[in-house]
Image (spheres, rainbow, N blue to C red):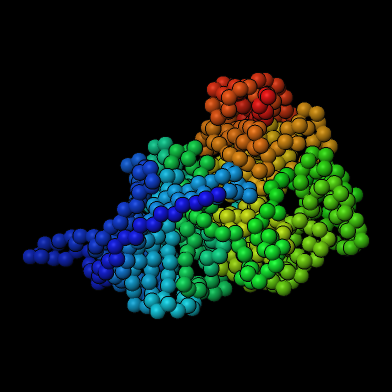
């Protein structure tokens, strides 16, 4: 698709700001010095305004407003490095531009995405380095990042002492966040984003780490904002968390901090020239936040990754990097139900190939242990059988221990071997470092983020899709590596006691920022989620390869058979219909002309209404799945629906509903 980029270069300034105090005395009275400079950035529709201010004290701060209401109170910006003093600088240049364009997704919330923002970059000159601070405003939020480069144009390694970034939340804001707690503190700092998003008071935070994303409600308004980061992979930086500074307890201030989950070996050594990950604030009403793709839009018109020797490749080899081989589709997955059966039991694996073929799903997954006692002849026969049934095979591997804790040569060798059998992708696990002996890196330290990038590049060369498990949050990387189409980083069905208050809040937080491998089943494990709730999750969690995790015969039930045959993986559009954190969530997905609607309820019974204003003209044949009174089974109802109709439903506690709507021709 065509894109348009319009640039407007601002004036070049050279204003000295170093060495000024915030106030001076004249005739014995204190006189406040004026701010040195301020720069305002507005969203294209004018609803969001960010102001960067260079104060008399030499500090750079920013504020953000939505429709005139303060979303971010005055908060610090900036970075400290040991090689220079950014506290004593001049304003060297200011450049502004408008950025617009569009792209098509291989997988994601929408098939087609447009982006439009205003951007201002302020360049500060210190002794040896420039510091660039770039602020953007979109209609659905704001984003900013830092750049550091040597004045003489050289490259090298610098030592990052601190990132100053703060998010000062307005008074009386409530937030929903994951608190960082190591999975096994006795063995190390392990974290894989597999804990609940709990409601907190912003003013009650004291010296604790919160994982991104963090969602908060701006006071008592209907404005929400979700804070996260983007373009981490490829930045040369570590993953970041948010923490209330010890010197500012109960203040509602969250400061960006180095990841607590990693080995931290030389983890402040960063190469320059440097561009930090984007700090992103998706901002607006609940519909705006939930439908936003801002985490990926900040990549602008980025090209898909190509190897450095691309120009030397044959035409056939160059075709790889169009990524036309990337196919979003549903996966059959048996480990959750058959965890007591060895994954190298190929009798069972043949059964799930048959399931995928019957349902028209594109993939099946062989999980941990599939290659124990590896028999090449047996495996090739299995792969041939899968290929004959048009089912692609994804294999599990350990991100660290299977590849000598990060050895690219071993990675390449094993991937090439698996690809030679016809393996189409990998489900790669335990980036957090579990089960690895003395790893030099783990979690989200710099070397682990670089290891993600190496894996993405080597799999791209071999046309293999990637599903990351035991991993960090998505940070928009599928814009550059479109074959990375699934990710865990969620409290999912592997924890069989996951409850409705968890899944509801994940819709408003984790599910906003990228693909999510929750692995829904049909029949609930416990009373924590009803049957219709589980069914709705197969619609609501966005994923390029949603993993269907129940017994193979379960999907043969005539009531649900057609629904699961049609379950969407490639989306044309995703809509938020209604909901509130801690209470309920209802969303809709358009795929191939059909609409799917899912609704999930938290721990109290709810009466909800579903409006069908999003439908096209004409009638739609609808099948509705609701809970029976036990919550253990679903009840199927057929009806006809038109645009503008309203459906009223009573949802059980922890219950839900699912719908499929097919236009009547």
The x and y percentages for residue 175 are 47, 45
Which of 548 and 341 lies nearest the eye of the viewer? 548
Q: Is 102 placed left or right of 395 in the picture? A: left
Q: Which of the two residues, 100 or 218, is positioned nearer the viewer here?
A: 100
Residue 620 x, y percent position in the rendering: 65, 24
The residue sitting at the left extreme is: 27
Examine the image and state in which quarter residue 132 appears.
bottom left
Q: Is residue 252 above or below residue 221?
A: below
* Image quarter hosting the C terminus: top right
Q: Outermost residue toward the front? A: 315
Left-right relation of 419 to 263: right
Query: In which image quadrant can residue 647 be found?
Result: top right
Q: Residue at x 42, y 77 (%)?
A: 153
Residue 147 location in percent, x, y?
Answer: 43, 66
Residue at figure coordinates x 34%, y 52% from the top left: 41
Q: Please name the residue shown 62% across and 36% down the image.
A: 590
Residue 88 shows up from this direction: yes
- Residue 230 lies, with reference to residue 451, above or below; the image says above
User: Could you tell me if residue 172 is visible in this image?
Assistant: no
- In this rendering, is residue 246 above or below 607? below
Q: Is residue 443 left or right of residue 295?
A: right
Vertical arrangement, residue 33 with respect to residue 662, above or below:
below
The residue furthest right is 377
x, y percent for residue 645? 56, 21
């Amino acid at each position: 698709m065509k894109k348009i980029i319009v640039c407007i270069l601002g004036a070049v300034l050279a204003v000295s700001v170093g060495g000024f105090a915030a106030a001076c005395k004249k005739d014995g009275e204190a006189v406040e010095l004026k701010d040195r400079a301020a720069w305002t950035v507005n969203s294209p529709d004018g609803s969001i305004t960010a102001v960067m201010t260079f104060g008399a004290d030499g500090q750079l701060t920013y504020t953000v407003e939505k429709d005139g209401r303060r979303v971010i109170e005055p908060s610090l910006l900036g970075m400290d490095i040991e090689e220079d003093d950014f506290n004593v600088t001049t304003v060297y240049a200011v450049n502004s531009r408008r950025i617009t364009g569009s792209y098509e997704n291989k997988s994601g919330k929408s098939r087609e995405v447009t982006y439009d923002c205003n951007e201002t970059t302020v360049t500060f000159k210190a002794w040896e380095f420039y510091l660039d601070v770039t602020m953007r405003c979109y209609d659905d939020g704001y984003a900013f990042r830092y750049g550091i480069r040597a004045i003489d144009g050289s490259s090298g390694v610098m030592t990052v002492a601190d990132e100053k970034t703060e998010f000062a939340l307005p008074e009386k804001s409530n937030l929903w966040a994951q608190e960082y707690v190591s999975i096994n503190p006795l063995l190390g700092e392990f974290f894989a984003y597999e804990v609940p998003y709990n409601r907190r008071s912003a003013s009650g935070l004291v010296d604790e780490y919160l994982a991104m994303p963090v969602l908060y409600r701006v006071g008592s308004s209907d404005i929400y904002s979700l804070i996260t980061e983007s373009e981490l992979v490829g930045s040369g930086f570590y993953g970041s968390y948010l923490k209330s500074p010890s010197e500012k307890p109960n203040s509602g201030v969250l400061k960006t901090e180095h990841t607590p989950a990693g080995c931290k070996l030389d983890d402040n050594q960063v190469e320059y020239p440097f561009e930090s990950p984007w700090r992103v604030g998706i901002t607006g009403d609940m519909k705006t936040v939930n439908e936003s793709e801002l985490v990926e839009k900040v990549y602008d018109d980025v090209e898909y990754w190509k190897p450095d020797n691309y120009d030397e490749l044959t035409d056939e080899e160059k075709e790889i990097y169009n990524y036309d081989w990337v196919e979003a589709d549903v996966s059959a997955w048996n480990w959750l139900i058959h965890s007591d059966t060895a994954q190298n039991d190929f009798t069972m694996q043949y059964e799930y190939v048959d399931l995928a073929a019957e349902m028209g799903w594109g993939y099946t997954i062989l999980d941990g242990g599939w290659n124990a006692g590896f028999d090449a002849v047996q495996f090739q026969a299995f792969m041939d059988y899968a290929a004959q049934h048009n089912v692609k095979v994804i294999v599990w591997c350990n991100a660290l221990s299977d590849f000598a804790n990060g050895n690219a040569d071993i990675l390449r060798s094993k991937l090439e071997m698996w690809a030679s059998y016809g393996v189409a992708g990998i489900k790669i696990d335990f980036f957090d470092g579990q089960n690895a002996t003395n790893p030099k890196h783990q979690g989200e330290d710099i070397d682990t983020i670089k290891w993600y990038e190496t894996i993405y590049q080597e799999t791209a060369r071999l046309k293999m899709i990637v599903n990351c498990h035991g991993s960090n949050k998505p940070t928009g990387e599928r814009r550059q590596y479109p074959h990375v189409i699934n990710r865990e980083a969620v409290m999912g069905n592997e924890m069989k006691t996951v409850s409705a208050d968890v899944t509801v809040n994940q819709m408003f937080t984790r599910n906003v920022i990228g693909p999510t491998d929750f692995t829904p089943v049909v029949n609930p494990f416990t009373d924590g989620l009803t049957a219709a709730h589980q069914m709705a999750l197969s619609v609501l969690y966005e994923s390029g390869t949603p993993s269907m995790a129940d017994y193979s015969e379960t999907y043969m039930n005539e009531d649900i058979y057609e629904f699961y045959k049609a379950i969407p993986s490639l989306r044309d559009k995703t809509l938020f219909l209604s909901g509130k954190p801690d209470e309920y969530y209802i969303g809709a997905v358009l795929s191939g002309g059909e609409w799917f609607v899912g609704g999930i309820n938290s721990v109290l019974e709810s009466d909800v209404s579903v409006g069908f204003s999003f439908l096209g003209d004409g009638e739609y044949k609808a099948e509705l799945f609701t809970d029976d009174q036990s919550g253990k089974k679903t009840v199927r109802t057929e009806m006809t629906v038109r645009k503008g109709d309203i459906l009223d439903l009573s949802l059980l506690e922890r219950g839900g509903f699912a719908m499929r709507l097919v236009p009547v021709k």
